[in-house]
Image: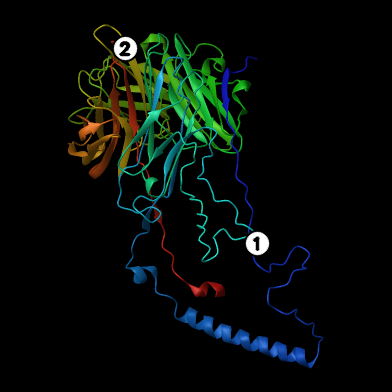
Amino acid sequence: MKKPAFRKKSGAGAEEPFEPTGAAGATDAAGSAEPTGSARPSVRLPGRSAGKTTQSLLAAAVVLAAVFGIAEARPPASPAKADGGAAPSTAQVERTAAVCPQPFQGLTGSTTLTAYTPPGTGTGTGSATGGAGWLSEESAPAVPPTAAPSAPATQAPSAAPSGSGAPATPAPDKNAAPADAKLTVTKPGTPATGPASNGDNAPGIGAVANGALAPGFTVSQTTVVTEQRGTGLSGITCTPENTNFWFAGASTAGDRVDYLSLVNPESSAAVVDIKLYGDKGLIDNDAANGITVAPGSSQSVLLSTLSKGAVNDLAVNVVVRSGRIGAALHAADGNKGADWIPASADPAPTQVMAGLPADTSAAHLVVWAPPEDDADLKIQLSGKNGWFTPAGNESIHVKAGMVAAVDLGKVTRDEVAGLRLSPTDDKHPTRIVAGLRVDRTGGNGKSDAAWLSGSVPVGARATVADNRAGASTVFLTSSGDAATVKVTGSAGSGGGTPATKEVQIPAGGTVAIPAPEPAGLNGVFAVTVETESGGPVVAARMLSVPTKDVPMFTVQALRDDRSTVQVPRATQDPGVVLR
């Protein structure tokens, strides 16, 4: 049986020692140690003194029962009375991590990494600038560095004696970026950008932010390739580690060269299964099961080695048996274009995709249905005035456990759009995964391609990091009620003043605007979308950078940055000891 073609890049992945600190005077396993500062208890024989002890214990029990009886008779105020029925409190996240895949830039391509944290109202770990954000190559641990174990009491203290004149040894900063970080973010509101490693075997990247830099922290990876095979602009928003990923729109037919990138920034190995689905269902291949990704390493898997022949349309499910990884799928169609196929939202009966440009020259829809049920779906487009059904492509039927595809052609008809798939019968919902290939062709016949996938709303706030002067367009689709959103262009990586624009979106409609550019822009900037009312809103950003007469472009969805968490309220209740 043919084995998958792997490319592997391993890292060191060293871990710092850890020593648990024991409690003073704790008893060891043999019971030889005694509580510090206490005498050994004497052994009493049964008799009169033992009776006194029993009476004392009974008296103590009566007192405790009285105390807790009063507590039960007069319980604490209910949460509604104690805090006025307030909802759980909201707290900012204190650590955010993401994984960027191997660039797939060939020998001559170039890749740029951009990291950004939007300014917020919180204080993170205690100060407006507390914390750190950094990007490191795959061998770096995906956790913040920890302080060394505390020194035993027999060692000399780190601080110099009073009056000695010697400076005290500073404590290590557990929030600081590692010394070998490839890129660091210094403060919220200003992007940091830099090149990835060169060459065909550039590794994946681990990104971490903590403290005040954690809420909303995001990283973009953008690659330009001008070689004949794989020509195009490839962009991706780096994603958190996970144990399950779905991709729709892969292929092993024609000139397609599709690679799956698996990156493990952790300190333990991960075991991965890759499941491929085509128009005849699951494609069995033992070589796709039990793939081990070593700690601090990357592997790339050529899909054609797993598909047992050419398959026009594929859905790919990456399942992690043990550990956690970052997974991404890169598609290249010879000189017709290349880009990342973004990971889809979880399987759901309705999938919405934003980001179809007005000059779309071709659109190809790929849908997967689960093995337990067929899916009958309506195809709808979101135009400037709301949802409508494209003539000749009103619906699609997908057999259970299989993939179905349909060519939509120039479906946008010179207007920007979003796309929605939903059950034709609301009483028969089937969880699906969907992807859409979008092509743009220049006047000289040269083209590039991008892939969209089912996405989630922007929620309170979502950000994409790498934007350039005159090159970024923001697509906004309201999948529900009319909505108002605020779109902000951050300061540039080298300077500039943020710019903000408020946008109204009709119910079911799609609006596209040039990204607001900061005044005095120097370098790249980030774009943040915030929902102010209505919605929900699904958004995407198109970056268009024509190169060598090729209309190169890439589209990334903006997804809720989940920068806050709900913290439930707790109420004291001594009565629980009597229940």
Image point (78%, 64%), residue name? 30
Question: Which quarter of the figure has residue 525?
Answer: top left
- Residue 128 coordinates in the image, percent (x, y): 33, 52
Answer above or below: position of 556 versus 303: below
Q: Earlier in the sequence, mark 2 or mark 1?
A: 1
Disc 2 + disc 1, Cβ < 8 Å: no
Badge 1 local density, few (<14 within 10 Å), some, or many (20+)?
few
User: At label 2, which amino acid type do we have?
Assistant: Ser
Badge 2 local density, few (<14 within 10 Å), some, or many (20+)?
many
Image point (45%, 77%), residue name? 75
Give the structural element (helix, strand or loop) at label 1.
loop
Give the structural element (helix, strand or loop) at label 2.
strand
Q: Which residue is mark 2?
A: 447
Q: Which residue is mark 1?
A: 22
The mark closer to the camera, 2 or 1, is 1
- Residue 97 coordinates in the image, percent (x, y): 45, 40
User: At label 1, which amino acid type do we have?
Assistant: Gly
Question: Which quarter of the figure has residue 489?
Answer: top left
Q: Nearer the viewer, residue 56 or 488?
A: 488
Answer above or below: position of 211 versus 371: below
